[in-house]
């Protein structure tokens, strides 16, 4: 798609600049790997250096592909095309059809569809991995039960599978709240945990740089992202569609 990118499309401003704020929880959720960190920590046997490398490298790879994806789609399609997609079919199919109309290539249109499907599948696997570990810890700590991996897999995958089959529109509804929940458990809650741990263990061998100011800044950003959907529903920010 990159040869079809035009500078005019890339330089076009959004129809409402406030959409940058409205969409920030979606951007944030796009990098929602934090639920997999306990699994990574367990796999790497608590090696802080290796864990730090995995997080930074994995985030960078994801960011590069995310930027290329945004660069390609927004560089190929004009603002008017995006508005047409939102009015006619604000789903992946709408984007695929628009890509085909612009590029004239069935292969590129299918590539867009496959890429989007793989993005959804990999995010599903990442969330499932974190949920798998969470359920395992819950059974051990609260109920003192050591479930085998087959039972843990059923408890992890069966409820969302049934939810998707019998209430498919609930996926989009749940996704609209994902940014809020994720901002809380991936930003606000970790800040509180770090704050408490530093009070209890002031001489830990490893500490993230920045001290209290960085914790406060991260907390403010987390609270802001959590509040944005409420502000949007109150009508003070434009609604994100699609």
Image: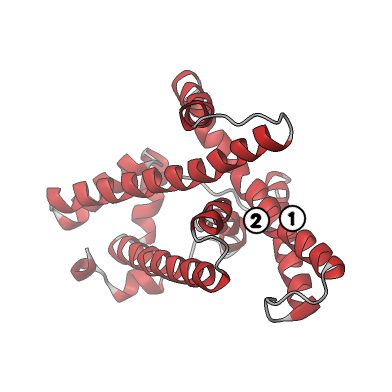
Q: Residue at x 48, y 31 (%)?
A: 153
**Where residue 137 sits in the image (x, y, percent)?**
64, 40
The answer to which of 204 and 235 lies nearer the viewer is 204
To which quarter of the image does residue 199 belong?
A: bottom right
Q: Residue at x 50, y 61 (%)?
A: 44
Provide the residue designation for mark 1.
189
Provide the residue designation for mark 2.
186
The image quadrant where one finds the N terminus is bottom left
Label 2: few (<14), some (14–19) or many (≥20) C-alpha neighbours in 10 Å: some
- Disc 1 and disc 2: Cα gap in Å? 6 Å
Q: Is residue 186 left or right of residue 2?
A: right
**Where residue 184 sits in the image (x, y, percent)?**
70, 52
Q: Residues at badges 1 and 2 in contact (C-beta under 8 Å)?
A: yes
Secondary element type, mark 2 = helix
Is residue 236 shown to the viewer in this render? Answer: no
**Where residue 102 sits in the image (x, y, percent)?**
21, 56
The answer to which of 142 and 188 lies nearer the viewer is 142
**Where residue 210 sits in the image (x, y, percent)?**
72, 81
Q: Is residue 129 left or right of residue 95?
A: right
The answer to which of 19 and 38 lies nearer the viewer is 38
Q: Is residue 192 left or right of residue 50?
A: right
Q: Residue furthest right?
A: 199
Q: Residue at x 57, y 34 (%)?
A: 173
């Amino acid at each position: 798609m990159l040869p079809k990118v035009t500078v005019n499309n890339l330089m076009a401003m959004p129809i409402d600049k406030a959409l940058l704020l409205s969409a920030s929880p979606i951007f944030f959720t796009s990098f929602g790997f934090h639920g997999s960190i306990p699994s990574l920590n367990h796999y790497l046997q608590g090696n802080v250096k290796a864990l730090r490398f995995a997080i930074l490298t994995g985030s960078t790879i994801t960011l590069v592909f995310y930027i290329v994806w945004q660069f390609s789609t927004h560089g190929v399609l004009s603002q008017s095309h995006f508005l047409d997609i939102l009015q006619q079919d604000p789903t992946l199919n709408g984007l695929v059809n628009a890509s085909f109309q612009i590029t004239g290539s069935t292969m590129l249109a299918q590539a867009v569809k496959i890429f989007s499907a793989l993005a959804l599948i990999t995010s599903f696997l990442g969330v499932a991995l974190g949920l798998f570990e969470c359920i395992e810890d819950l059974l051990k700590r609260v109920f003192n039960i050591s479930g085998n991996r087959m039972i843990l897999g059923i408890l992890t995958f069966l409820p969302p599978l049934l939810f998707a089959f019998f209430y498919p529109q609930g996926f989009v509804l749940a996704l609209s709240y994902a940014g809020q929940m994720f901002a809380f458990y991936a930003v606000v809650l970790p800040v509180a945990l770090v704050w408490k741990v530093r009070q209890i263990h002031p001489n830990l061998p490893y500490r993230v740089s920045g001290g209290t100011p960085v914790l406060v800044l991260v907390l403010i950003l987390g609270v802001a992202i959590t509040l944005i959907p409420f502000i949007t529903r109150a009508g003070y920010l434009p609604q994100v569609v699609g």
